[in-house]
Image (cartoon, helix red, strand yellow):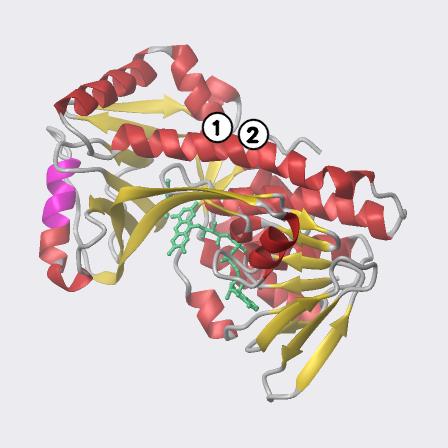
Amino acid sequence: MGIIGAGPAGLLLSRMLAVQGIESVVLENRSRDYVEARIRAGILEQHTVDTLREVGMGARLDREGLEHDGIYLQYPGTRHKLDFPELCGRNVWIYGQSEVVKDLIAAQLDDGPPLLFEVSDVQPRDVDTDSPSIAFTDADGVAQVLECDVVAGTDGFHGVSRPIVTAATDGQLWERTYPFAWLGILADVAPSTDDLIYAWHPDGFAMHSMRSPSVSRLYIQVDPTEKIEDWSDDRIWEALATRMALPGWELQTGPVTEKSILPMRSFVSSPMRHGRLFLAGDAAHIVPPTGAKGLNLAVADVTLLARALVRLLAEKETDLADAYSDKALARVWRCTHFSWWMTSMLHTHGDDFDAQLQLSQLQRVCTSEAAARELAEMYTGLPVAL
Ligand code: FAD
Ligand code: DHB
């Protein structure tokens, strides 16, 4: 197997295949430090945690991860807890994507398959034959060719793999760009809440998440044209406190250690395979962050893909490989809908009519068990239907 990209999708795929006795080489164009330092997702669904444990990646997650049994939904005057175990029998975990990636890289470099950082000019070749290859230049500047049976394109949204699949299959792309962005901060301060808070406010959405008992992660909705330099720490804390205000509750502030603005888009590319090149994770789809589906979808894709590849390479049966794209896309579209729905319900946009519809929807989720259960089932993650 040749695997392009050492994000969570590529690293986990390599690990899953190694457990099944299939060799792979992972090619990453960034440095180890860069990949490990990228601050991204923070919520792991039940199936993601189960999968990481199954491949021996659960030790630090079980020690340091924070198991959460729900979230708060807030709109002016109300902060309502959705109790996930009661609603759907599942939980979620707080454990940063950077920690998942660090664990996977450490295991890979310890006793796993080769993982090459700082490669360049990566180019999959002959993927419509049974003997594809990947041309690349290694970190020493030497041109190399990796001969493989299958290529996995787990190289994220800006990678080289998706354009090859799209061009060869006359594939379809669906995209929605949202008229808002998230300004996210990491702060050295104990979380002011036991569970995550998703807050609707006339000034815009705000969210309180966390990374550990002493590190908080918080977000506010901003216009996508905003410049981070215009947001002093004080201005950010003030916006957070206003948007999450509730009588008797106070937001604790502390030193901000990272801040950035994230654009928001939905994107789906179909099919997720051409010949012996298979796409997984952000290479094939992007969701807006509300609801924390991006990383979890990548894990669901590679769970399906690993199974299909074991069947293809070890058992010489093509059925699961042939079914991969349709099966993965069915789940992708469900999560694309959920992420779009959470985003649309919680972010200020449109006019007063839109605001009333949002508040009505929030009230429904906070008062109807059926509506709450649907959110809980999707948030904690659908099982991967193998
Ligand atoms: P990636 O993590 O993007 O990994 C792809 C890898 O491929 C990267 O290491 C990249 O360097 C490498 N690569 C790219 N091109 C090449 C090439 N040509 N050759 C070799 N290697 C290559 N999701 C959430 O659920 N919640 C969040 O809060 C959240 N925040 C996010 C914030 C940001 C700024 C971003 C960008 C994403 C965020 N996401 C979030 C989404 C989530 O992080 C992604 O869905 C997840 O990283 C997908 O994993 P992946 O392995 O498919 O792709
Ligand atoms: C986080 C990010 C999300 O998009 C989300 O819905 C919940 C938590 C986080 O970074 O902690």
Q: Overall secondary structure of the magenta stretch?
A: helix
Q: Amino acid at mark 1?
A: Met
Q: Which residue is mark 2?
A: 382
Q: Amino acid at mark 2?
A: Leu
Q: Residues within 10 Å of mark 1 (few under 14, many from 20)?
A: some
Q: Which residues are magenta?
A: 237-244
Callout 2: helix, strand or loop? Answer: loop
Quick check: is 238 in the magenta stretch? yes
Q: Position of residue 294 (x, y in %)?
A: 47, 45
Q: Is residue 33 above or below residue 182?
A: below
Q: Quadrant of residue 167?
A: bottom right
Q: Residue placed at 40% from the left, 12% from the top?
A: 369
Q: Position of residue 82 (x, y in %)?
A: 36, 23
Comparing 67 with 312, the one in front is 312
Is residue 346 rendered to the left or right of residue 2? left
The answer to whether any part of residue 283 appears in the image is yes
| Mark 1 → mark 2, Cα distance in angstroms | 6 Å
Q: Residues within 10 Å of mark 2 (few under 14, many from 20)?
A: some
Q: Which residue is mark 1?
A: 378
Q: Residue placed at 55% from the left, 49% from the top?
A: 284
Q: Residue placed at 14% from the left, 30% from the top?
A: 246
Q: Position of residue 10 (x, y in %)?
A: 61, 58
Farthest residue to the right: give it. 315
Is residue 156 rendered to the left or right of residue 262? right
Quadrant of the drawing holding the N terminus: bottom right
